[in-house]
Amino acid sequence: TPDEWIPRDSRMVRLTGKHPFNSEAKLRDLYSYGFITPSNLFFVRNHGAVPRIDDETAKNWKIEIHGLCQNSGSLSLDDLRTMFEVVTVPITLVCAGNRRKEQNVVQKSLGFSWGAAGLSTALFTGVWLSDVLGFFQPQKGAKHVIFEGGDSLPNGPYGTSQLLSWAKDRRRGMLLAWAMNGLPLEPDHGFPIRLVVPGQIGGRSVKWLKKIELSENESQHHLHFHDNKVLPMPIGPDQARAEKAWWYDPSYIIRDLNVNSAIASPDHDEILRAPDTEVYTLRGYAYAGGGRRISRVEISLDEGKTWSLAQIQYIEDQFRGVSHHDTVYGSLDLSDSDQSFCWSFWSFDAEVKALKEAPSITVRAMDESLALQPRDMYWNATGMMNNWWFRVCIHRLG
Ligand code: MTE
């Protein structure tokens, strides 16, 4: 296969055969490392072959910036490093297909089956996109910023766009990043440089970034305009395929992530051997979109009739009060704000006896805009943004 030159961790579960490489770790493994995912366990979503870029090419790699801006031109990695504030920010990326497997069990959608580990978190180092756009001075009439990657795909290059008003807003946290967890990006994650967009579907974080264009119009790239969508529920996969009109309605394009959560332990189908009198700590993750914080996580042991509050841990709190945290977030001091660019972790102590008697263990989360995960699945043809209550069933022993 074209990517054979890339060494990959054998713990990664391949989801689409040999090629392209799409993979997630086992949720339990992923979770066991804590808030920051080791780069070799970071989920991978590639639409085609990974561009093979050697160090020399990377050194000369330039991002071209053109369109409706006063200055157009190109910037190398060295230019970015020397011209703008360099920051390191913890950011969670989530594939829009996270948890699609549950949808595919109900009815096959157009996409492949992600479990609940289609997300990962890293410390990304780079420069604020807002600073770079400020330098190029968008002109009147520019409404969108279009990004294009260096991979070649059957339907043209990979590309997507942002509203200019969002891209200019530093509080949205968009970065042009060249490092991940302190090391240059891995080829699978966009070496030498990628866009990183917190709070939005992972598809917005263009890898192997080559071009930025300021435009009146939204990106017309295939995956942006015709794929990353949640179509209305009654549209089945065959109809979606046959009636192209569905793909031309921009109102179904997805941007911010929706509120979601999952249980990392126990695993679905796990055998609980602990004695009835012990306490078992249920654990998992929750996230929301658009920089919103998770405001509550609830657990039900009776299929949603009653709920108990779980404890939440925020990654941002780990940076609060760290003496040199200004080098972490730079001039955007997120550690002092309510914004969140990351997953949070939750835990809940339950009696083993109660767990063994429960028909299932269910979790749901709410974000600070009071958006709550729905009880029912919103099945949709592309199988994206699945966020109904997450459940596991365990086996009792003893
Ligand atoms: N950028 C390019 N150039 N090509 C791609 O195939 N996949 C996108 C996005 N950026 C993609 C891309 C999708 S759908 C996701 S979810 C994220 O990258 C995944 O990033 P990761 O592979 O680093 O986890």
Image (cartoon, grey):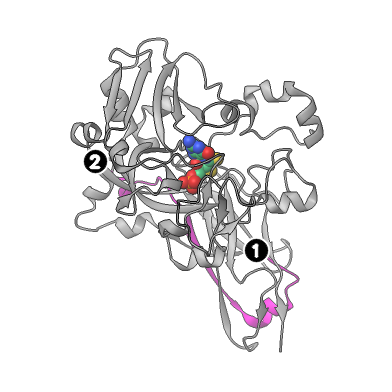
The residue that label 1 is drawn on is 307
For the point 68% across and 62% down, the residue is 391
Task: Using residue 87 as the reference point, say whether residue 214 is left or right of it.
Answer: right
Q: Which of 125 and 304 lies nearest the eye of the viewer?
A: 125
Task: Using residue 214 as the reference point, say whether residue 228 is left or right of it.
Answer: right
Report whether the residue tagged 1 is closer than 8 Å to ligand 1: no
Residue 86 - label: 2
Work out whether residue 200 can be spotted: no
Choose the circle earlier in sequence order: 1 or 2: 2
The quadrant of the rendering that contains the C terminus is bottom right
**How far apart, in angstroms, are the residues tagged by discs 1 and 2?**
44 Å
Residue 29 percent across, percent down from the top left? 51, 67
Q: Which of 245 and 280 lies nearest the eye of the viewer?
A: 245
The verdict on residue 360 being magenta is yes
Q: Which of 111 and 292 lies nearest the eye of the viewer?
A: 111
Please identify, in this view, whether the residue under mark 1 or under mark 2 is nearer the observer. Answer: 2
Q: Which residues are magenta?
A: 333-361
Q: Which of 61 and 63 lies nearest the eye of the viewer?
A: 61
Residue 58 percent across, percent down from the top left? 31, 38
When the figure is inspected, residue 101 is found, relative to residue 152, above or below; the finding is: below
Q: Amino acid at mark 1?
A: Trp
Residue 290 percent across, percent down from the top left? 48, 39
Work out whether residue 96 can be spotted: yes
Q: Amino acid at mark 2?
A: Val
- The quadrant where residue 59 appears: top left
